[in-house]
Image (cartoon, rainbow, N blue to C red):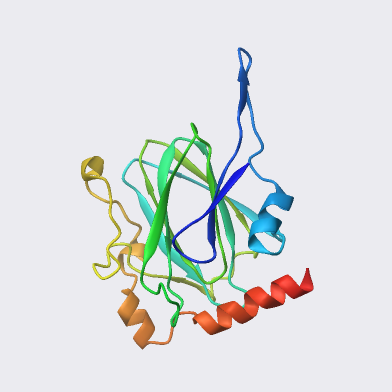
Amino acid sequence: MQTRELAIPGAWEFTPKQHGDDRGVFFEQYRYDVLQDVVGHPLDLKQTNTSVSARGVARGIHYALVPPSQAKYVSAPKGAFIDFVIDIRVGSPTFGQWDSVVIDDVDRRAVYLSEGLGHAIVALTEGATVNYLVTETFNPEREKGLSVLDGDIGLVFPDDIGEILLSPKDTSAPTLSEAESLGLLPTWDECQAFYQQLRTEN
């Protein structure tokens, strides 16, 4: 399995080696030891989520407050989507910046994003299926969102995707600057302290 750190500190891409023949294909979608080597601690799996989206659907930008927040390992059992990782940690050297990876059922990449990072997807195919391995169960009181259409963040969508389809919750989400002014964002320092705690505990 090949690994690559994204432009946002605390996020990595994982590309499995696929073994195919006339029967089909076999590959390792997740390896705890590979992830532990690059992240510095294992993924403490608490919940698995799946979403299925029509082409043009956007989900996000979602995040959870630190601690404990929620780290995610994201893959595509079916279809294709753009996976966006957004740095929303106040004080981070890449605050407000983002990186993206196309995740699909051809190259079968996955993305890991650490606690405190923002996450969004945009479905490129009908029935795009997203699988999330996450480190905490859903906690509605600590789950937050930002506008995926925030011009200051400036996520770039394919020209041919058409109208972006959002849930009412995501449509009404605040911008990055609004959330910062309300004190709703994690900070770089608290995230770094939490990452160090995870490395020490494991």
Location of the C terminus by quadrant is: bottom right
Q: Position of residue 119 (x, y in %)?
A: 45, 61
- Most foreground residue, 9 or 154: 9
Residue at far right of view? 202
Looking at the image, is 200 positioned above or below residue 26?
A: below
Q: Left or right: 114 with respect to 40? A: left
Residue 26, how many percent across, how many down?
65, 27
**Residue at the spot 59% in from the left edge and 63% down from the top edge:** 71
Q: Is residue 106 above or below residue 36?
A: above
For the point 50% across and 66% down, the residue is: 9
Position of residue 176 in the picture relative to residue 32 (left or right): left
- Say which of 38 and 121 sits in front: 38
Closer to us: 87 or 61:
87
Classify residue 168 by image quadrant. bottom left
The image shows residue 160 at horizontal and vertical percentages of 22, 40
In the picture, measured across the screen, residue 105 lies left or right of residue 169, that is right
State the residue at coordinates (42%, 87%): 183
Please identify the quadrant where the N terminus is shown: top right
Q: How many marks?
A: 0
List x then y, in percent, for residue 46: 69, 60
In-image side of 142 versus 173 (left or right)? right
